[in-house]
Image (cartoon, grey):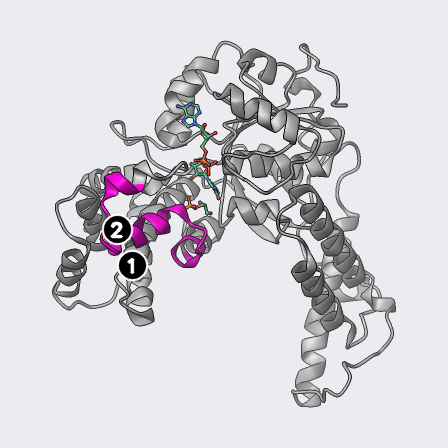
């Protein structure tokens, strides 16, 4: 049975933000304990990989749990590797000369000791997940369901409530423990449930994960404004720019709620299906409130999920929005069957365009080359699971946008965002050939092949 519903329970019950402060400095070498023996680590990595490949992909609870257990065991073995036996992988002679080998081993040992020291220094007291008893997820699409499930698995007593519009899907989720519309084939953890009742879903929740598509977020948030306590942090996972206003979600949220709500923007390379499968994933939690970003880092972190923190909200948001548009371009190149050279050149050009515009709006270089920038660009441009890329592939193969959108039940945020990006580029006086070409194709002003030819025939320039 799910944990009890507590209407009075609010963010006040969350742990003090100083609790999870961690020390990041590397210690002096002599402070460390014995280094691990050579030969242990490759075995751990191999076992983790073997566990991964033998996991079923269709049962989120089981697969995620197996992955978390495998990753925990591997991490524990890494941390405790100092006491392991000196075994060499059978039949393999060392690749590097002895001097290099000992340097490599020393560097690795230092890393493992740092990891151990770091873990020991984690704060005492209740962690955010221990302190929480309810989390509400706005939108029960693929990513809201996946992120809610990963929290539910961390704590079986946690009440994770998906707030949906569709009563039939709610019934389905509550009776079959499967989100048949957005994540068919995955069994959800038992402590994930769904409702269409916003007041009931939100009451008593310590955190709200916002996973409603950007273009519907303003209306959605306006609708829940009265029942959402002003101190409940919103963890926004939606990536895109609002049509009409050009706003990022960090602007949409306070504008729709009419107040400054605590908020964190979680982004990075993270396909919902792979999160459900418990495959290793890395994301970044960005907030102007660094303590809140650390709290959310700790809330989501698991053996399967690394969470970096950042205070560069603008950078994380703009990169997350722009990579979706670039992924459509990558899909077009794929759909036109232009080859690997073309795809790599396109993505490199797209990365430059994202860097030019992101810097103009204030993104930090570390963000652009980090998880929400380069990390998510790579995933979305190369990964077959991307909906944005899939739109591009179908356009490249000759389908019309209207038909593509009509046949898809899931959002491809880049479609709406592409037009907004061109306006933003004009505002900041940046020329973005690839991203503008995507908007032209989507707006039916250019055939995909014509767009490629036009971009190829632009003047030859110096790289910048
Ligand atoms: N799917 C992923 O792998 C993934 C990963 C990271 C981030 N995201 C981002 O998360 C956001 C949500 O994506 P998703 O994949 O869950 O989308 P989805 O298409 O799978 O589901 C969208 C959800 O939003 C709901 N919704 C749509 N219109 C609504 C409205 N007007 N009011 C209320 N709810 C509405 C739908 O009912 C559904 O529950 C997007 O911005 C996406 O870019 C997705
Ligand atoms: O499927 P897409 O293209 O919406 O991408 C999903 C996520 O943003 C990947 O990080």
* Residue 290 to residue 334: above or below: above
Q: Residue at x 58, y 46 (%)?
A: 275
Element assignment for label 2: helix
Q: Please name whichever residue, 18 or 325, is drawn nearer the observer in this view of the structure.
A: 325
Q: Main secondary structure of the magenta part?
A: helix
In this rendering, position of residue 87 left or right of residue 177: right
Q: Is residue 393 magenta?
A: yes
Looking at the image, is 124 positioned above or below residue 384? above
- Identify the mark at residue 124; answer none if there is no mark: none
Whether residue 122 is situated above or below residue 190 in the rendered picture = below
Q: Quadrant of residue 443?
A: top left
Packing grade of label 2 (10 A; few <14, some 14-19, many >=20) is: many
Disc nearer the start of the sequence (1/2): 1
Residue found at x 27% / y 30%: 243
Is 463 in front, or is 300? 300
Magenta span:
378-404
Cα separation, mark 1 vs mark 2, equals 7 Å
Q: Quadrant of the C terminus?
A: bottom left
Q: Is disc 1 in contact with disc 2, using a CB cutoff of under 8 Å?
A: yes
Horizontal placement of 444 versus 343: left or right?
A: left
Residue carrying label 2: 395
Residue nearest the viewer, comparing 52 with 296: 52
**124 relative position to 221: left or right:** right
Residue 246 sits in quarter: top left
Q: Position of residue 225 (x, y in %)?
A: 47, 13
* Residue hosting label 1: 335
């Amino acid at each position: 049975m799910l944990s009890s519903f507590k209407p009075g329970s609010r963010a006040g019950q969350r742990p003090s933000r100083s609790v999870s402060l961690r020390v990041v400095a590397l210690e002096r070498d002599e402070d460390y304990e014995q280094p691990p023996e050579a030969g242990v680590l490759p075995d751990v990595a191999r076992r983790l990989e073997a566990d991964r490949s033998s996991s079923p992909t269709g049962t989120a609870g089981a697969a995620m749990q197996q992955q978390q257990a495998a990753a925990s065991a591997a991490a524990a073995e890494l941390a405790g590797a100092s006491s392991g036996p000196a075994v060499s992988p059978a039949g393999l002679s060392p690749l590097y000369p002895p001097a290099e080998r000992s340097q490599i081993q020393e560097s690795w040992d230092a890393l493992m000791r740092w990891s151990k020291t770091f873990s020991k220094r984690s704060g005492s007291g209740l962690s955010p997940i221990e302190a929480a008893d309810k989390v509400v997820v706005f939108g029960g699409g693929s990513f809201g369901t996946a992120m809610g499930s990963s929290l539910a698995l961390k704590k079986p007593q946690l009440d994770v409530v998906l707030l949906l519009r569709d009563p039939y899907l709610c019934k389905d989720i509550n009776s079959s423990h499967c989100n048949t519309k957005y994540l068919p084939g995955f069994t959800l953890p038992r402590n994930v449930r769904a409702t269409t009742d916003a007041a009931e879903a939100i009451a008593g929740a310590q955190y709200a994960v916002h996973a409603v598509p950007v273009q519907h977020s303003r209306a959605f948030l306006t609708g829940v404004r009265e029942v959402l306590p002003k101190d409940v942090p919103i963890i926004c996972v939606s990536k895109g720019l609002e049509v009409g206003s050009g706003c990022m979600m960090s602007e949409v949220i306070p504008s729709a709620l009419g107040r400054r709500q605590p908020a964190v923007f979680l982004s990075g390379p993270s396909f919902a299906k792979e999160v459900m499968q418990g495959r290793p994933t890395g994301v970044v939690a960005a907030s102007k409130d660094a303590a809140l970003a650390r709290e959310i880092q700790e809330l989501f972190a698991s053996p399967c999920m690394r969470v970096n923190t950042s205070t560069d909200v603008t950078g994380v948001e703009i990169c997350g929005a722009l990579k979706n548009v670039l992924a459509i371009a990558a899909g077009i190149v794929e759909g036109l069957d232009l080859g690997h050279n073309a795809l790599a050149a396109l993505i490199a050009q797209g990365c430059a365009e994202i860097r030019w515009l992101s810097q103009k709006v204030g993104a930090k270089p570390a963000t652009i080359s980090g998880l929400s920038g380069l990390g998510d660009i790579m995933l979305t441009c190369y990964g077959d699971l991307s909906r944005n890329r899939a739109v591009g592939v179908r356009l490249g193969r000759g389908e019309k946008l209207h038909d593509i959108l009509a046949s898809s039940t899931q959002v491809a945020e880049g479609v709406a965002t592409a037009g907004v990006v061109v306006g933003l580029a004009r505002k900041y006086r940046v020329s973005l050939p690839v991203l503008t070409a995507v908007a032209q194709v989507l707006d039916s002003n250019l055939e995909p092949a014509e767009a490629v030819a036009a971009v190829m025939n632009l003047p030859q320039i110096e790289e910048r």
